[in-house]
Image: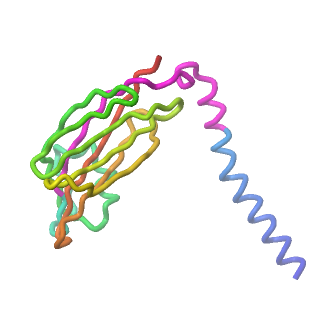
Amino acid sequence: MNRINAVKGRVLGTALAAILAPAAAFTVTALGSADAEAAVDKAACRVHVVEAKTEGDGTVPKNLKFLEEELQGLMAFKSFELVASKDLKLETGKPGTLKFPRHELKLQLLGGDKKLKLRATILGASGKSLVGANYSIADDGVVMLPVVKKDKSGATVYAIQCHSKRT
């Protein structure tokens, strides 16, 4: 029994070290950059609206190759069509709004230091909130917010990507 516990301890210790070592290396790198320590007070965002359907062969079209990895992560969907792309400039505490045919996206920059902190709300045609999310993300990272259709045949996916302007 002691031998089993010793093996478990070594395995857990090795796994913990493997998890913590990259995090520690990232922390040191991030803290070493003066730009990363500055406060975020503005951001430039681009929102791509993609219609995703459960029917199809799983191929991502050429005009969506820049989102291929993220779209393939949405395993329930097998076909994708870019519907719109819009830009939005944000300032801390001042929400921005983008209107699309079926939905309205409200995006607010909450601040941040090493990562952008944002709040996204997607409203339906009636003004009812369908999706709401507060999130933190690295510069130029992509957040995917799907609004699934009632019949579950597909979704409208909002791919939000922002780049910070630091002071």
Residue 85 lies left or right of residue 40; in this view the side is left
Q: Is residue 60 above or below residue 48?
A: below
Q: Is residue 125 above or below residue 139?
A: below
Image coordinates for residue 157, horizontal then vertical, percent: 24, 53
Residue drawn at 33 percent across, 45 percent down: 120
Q: Is residue 16 on the magenta stretch? A: no
Judging depth in this view, the residue of 36 and 68 nearest the camera is 36
Image coordinates for residue 69, horizontal then vertical, percent: 33, 51
Residue 97 in view: yes
Image coordinates for residue 24, horizontal then vertical, percent: 68, 40
Magenta residues, start to end: 25-51
Residue 83 lies left or right of residue 16; in this view the side is left
Residue 44 lies left or right of residue 99; in this view the side is right
Q: Is residue 30 on the magenta stretch? A: yes
Q: Is residue 33 above or below residue 74?
A: above
- Colour scheme used in the picture? rainbow
Q: Quadrant of the N terminus?
A: bottom right
Residue drawn at 22 percent across, 43 percent down: 48
Which residue is farthest bottom? Answer: 1
